[in-house]
Image (cartoon, rainbow, N blue to C red):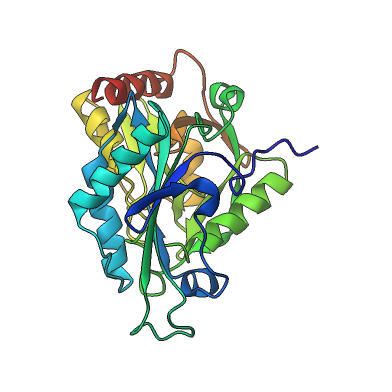
Amino acid sequence: MNMLKSFENRDGWIWMNGKIIPWKDANSHIISQGLHYASAVFEGERAYNGKIFKSEEHTKRFFKSAEIIGMEIPFTHDQINKAKYELIDKMNYKNCYVRPLAWRGGNQMGLSTGESNINVAIAVWDDWATYFKIEDQKAGLRLITSPWKRPAPDTAPYEAKASGPYIICTLSKEFAEKKGYHDALMLDYRGYVAEGTGANIFFIKDKNIHTPIPDCFLNGITRQTVIEMATSQGFQITEKHLMPDEIGNYDEAFLTGTAAEITPIKSIDDFKYNTGDNTTTFKFMNDFSDMVKNAS
């Protein structure tokens, strides 16, 4: 039996086009460029103890993503920042996930966008306490290499958190789960290691940490935060192109993202990594948890 709580039929509130309205009334018409042509951008953010971690950085990326795909968000940065907190307060949350979304509506249909209207909404929910199950986080995730690849930078707007390219991630995640894995490792168009389906990836050997160069996938805000944190602790961070057969040379591996936070990897295909309380990854998890809570 499927016990998942539907996101379509919930109580609560959503901020939409400048107003807070009942959750169940936050609808968009079936004829919408955002739905038909994936003409949308979004953000993923987390609030800890009532404060959104790096809220301004997320809002800047939200507007930058819209600019990259040719959308002009009809609100200011301050209005979006204020709306996020108004909604969190209205929902009476302290710890929650925050999802701003902007999409082209139904004023115009087809691929032309000159007459499109732009809708903006923000939703928050509290049942993504962890993106992966807690028991899976503790044991470490099992990944399998996806047959789908991150496209070249001149074929998809990789610097935008845009809806369209995420179909590749959805296909990769589905591929992994159907084979009994938690997630998929995605390679890029050249065959280099890129990322997970919705999170960046790091590899550890002693005091050296290697992570792929974000030249065809999103340079995540959590990724940047972890690089700063690890560097301050004396780790040597190297961004480099990694071939799949190189990832067996490392002792530990982990994923980073707003939803995933820091999540250890137990294996990728036949390569296995150290997990548990005595690992550097486990220490990073605790350090990151302290950081976001103290920042709040």
Task: Please give left or right for residue 220 compared with residue 243 in the image.
Answer: left
Where is residue 116? Give x, y as percent.
37, 79
In which quarter of the view is residue 153 placed?
A: bottom left
In which quarter of the view is residue 237 placed?
A: top left
Task: Please give left or right for residue 260 compared with residue 120 in the image.
Answer: right
Name the image quarter holding the C terminus.
Answer: top left
Q: Residue at x 41, y 24 (%)?
A: 281
Task: Please give left or right for residue 153 compared with residue 133 in the image.
Answer: left
Where is residue 197? Give x, y as percent.
52, 50
Name the residue at the top extreme. Answer: 278
Q: Residue at x 38, y 65 (%)?
A: 119
Q: Relative to the observer, which residue lies in front, 168 or 292?
A: 292
Q: From what the image shows, is residue 216 above or below residue 204?
A: below
Task: Please give left or right for residue 132 compared with residue 41 in the image.
Answer: right
Q: Relative to the observer, which residue lies in front, 271 or 6?
A: 6
Where is residue 273? Give x, y as percent.
53, 29
Q: Residue at x 32, y 52 (%)?
A: 213
Where is residue 33? Give x, y as percent.
48, 75
Q: From what the image shows, is residue 103 above or below residue 267?
A: below
Q: Relative to the observer, which residue lies in front, 278 or 241?
A: 278
Name the image quarter holding the N terminus.
Answer: top right
Q: From what the image shows, is residue 144 above or below residue 161?
A: above
Q: Relative to the observer, which residue lies in front, 266 or 80?
A: 80
Name the residue at the right extreme. Answer: 1
Q: Residue at x 33, y 34 (%)?
A: 209
In which quarter of the view is residue 170 placed?
A: bottom right
Residue 94 appearing in the image: yes
Q: How many marks can you see?
A: 0
Residue 217 appearing in the image: no
